[in-house]
Image: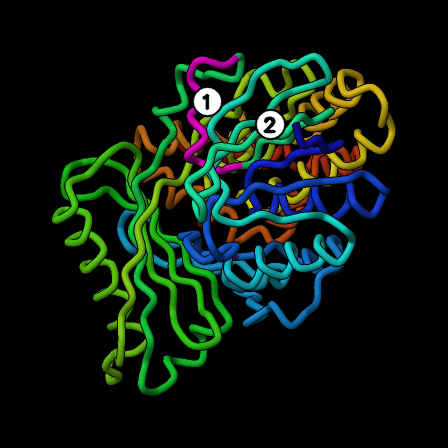
Amino acid sequence: MESAELVIVGCGPAGATAAREASRAGVRAVVLEKDAVVGEKRVCAAGLRPGFCDEFDLPRGIVHFDTPRLALFDARGDEHEVIFGPGHTSTREELDGTIARLASEEGAQIRTQALFRGLSRGEKGTVVEYADLRSGARRKITARSVFLAQGATAILDGTRFAFDRWRDGLMTTLQYRVYLDRPAATIAYRTLELHYYVGSDGRQIVGWMFPKRDHLAIGLGVIGKMEGGKLRAELDALTQRIRERLYPQTAPSRVKVEGHLLYMGAPRPILTSDGVMLGGTAAGLVDATNGEGIYEAAMSGRLAAESLAQHRNDPYRAAQRYARAVGSRFVRRLRHRLKLMHFLERRPDRFGILFKQLASTPHLPEILHGEARRRTVRERIFLYTQLARFFLAAR
């Protein structure tokens, strides 16, 4: 049977980063990607946090626009401007494809049209089974370590990673890529828009508009399932509101429709099992307040690679080190963000209260954006004071 030191399932930001950095450390990595083209079918606004390309050593050529404005629209449709970063926009085709190319240059072997089918224990490690969609054959690889990073579709029922609240966090999304004959208003290309409002059926909707090099990405998501016609009607209504502000005199030359499942729930309680590690969205590493998960995904890939390099001959110790690193860095913060989102959803006017505070207190978004482990005592005191102020106003 074929063997490898590391098998990675999924070639998104988590899997591709793990492959690149593990290969750079001398670990023989094989990546199984179900799609024919890496990143081609990812439905994602693809907003990158400030400094992302520098932190992960990626070429600036993947960045479409630097966006210093975050426009938050509350349940009444009022806009609140937050200056930050700036952030960046890209597409998942470029982002995922670039990281995958760099991983290949480091020596990783990336196999597309390789559909993951399951894991089992073997005498010499974990046996990964997949379907080769080109030939129709079933294949197996024995791996010393495995990193699962297949995104929101990673249900993983019947394994130790199974999480009975996983489906509660699955979000149905629909996105338009709106290609215009003429440019939209200048401000559109400097802004990331996030819209929080109640949909026609009473459920919370999160919408977005992110500018791209040749189109505007306009989309929305709702937790749970929504019938296709209703979802399309919700997106049409949001798109019309955005059009009236940003491109009222410009007719789209083309509109591409994309739909997929995203995840905006709690992190999985178990991230490792028998030398197998779980990363990115498959691990539930997503900020429920804004859908950000690309940074967490890429960083989980880095932490997996670092753990393997540290304990190359002991996959169990590597997995334990990985779980501790991800837990301390992300899990607590993401659970707090989910609780905050639930608190806001219970009374939608609270979104406006929070957004006003963020817009009027420039230092607050900066602190919230950073990682807790890097905050000074002074910043922590400031943050707790601001949180008390918000909860008093929103109670």
**Span highlighted in magenta in the image:** 150-159
Q: What residue is pinned by disc 2?
A: 278
Which amino acid type is shown beneath numbered disc 2? Leu
Image point 46% across, 70% down: which residue? Answer: 212
Overall secondary structure of the magenta section: loop
**Disc 1 and disc 2 in contact, CB within 8 angstroms:** yes
In-image side of 219 versus 314 (left or right): left
Q: Is residue 20 magenta?
A: no
Give the quarter of the image for residue 171: top left
Q: What residue is pinned by disc 1?
A: 156
Q: CA distance from mark 1 to mark 2?
A: 10 Å
Say which element carries label 1: loop
- Relative image position of residue 302 (x, y in whole percent): 73, 40
Say which element carries label 2: strand
In-image side of 196 versus 66 (left or right): left
Q: In the image as oriented, which residue stretches furthest toward the left?
A: 229
| Camera-nearest residue between 97 and 239 | 97
In-image side of 241 versus 218 (left or right): left
Q: Dot 1, how many residues are within 10 Å of its Cα: few (below 14), some (14-19), or many (20+)? A: few
Image point 76% across, 16% down: which residue? Answer: 316
- Relative image position of residue 59 (x, y in whole percent): 70, 67
In-image side of 16 versus 173 (left or right): right
Quadrant in the picture for the N terminus: top right
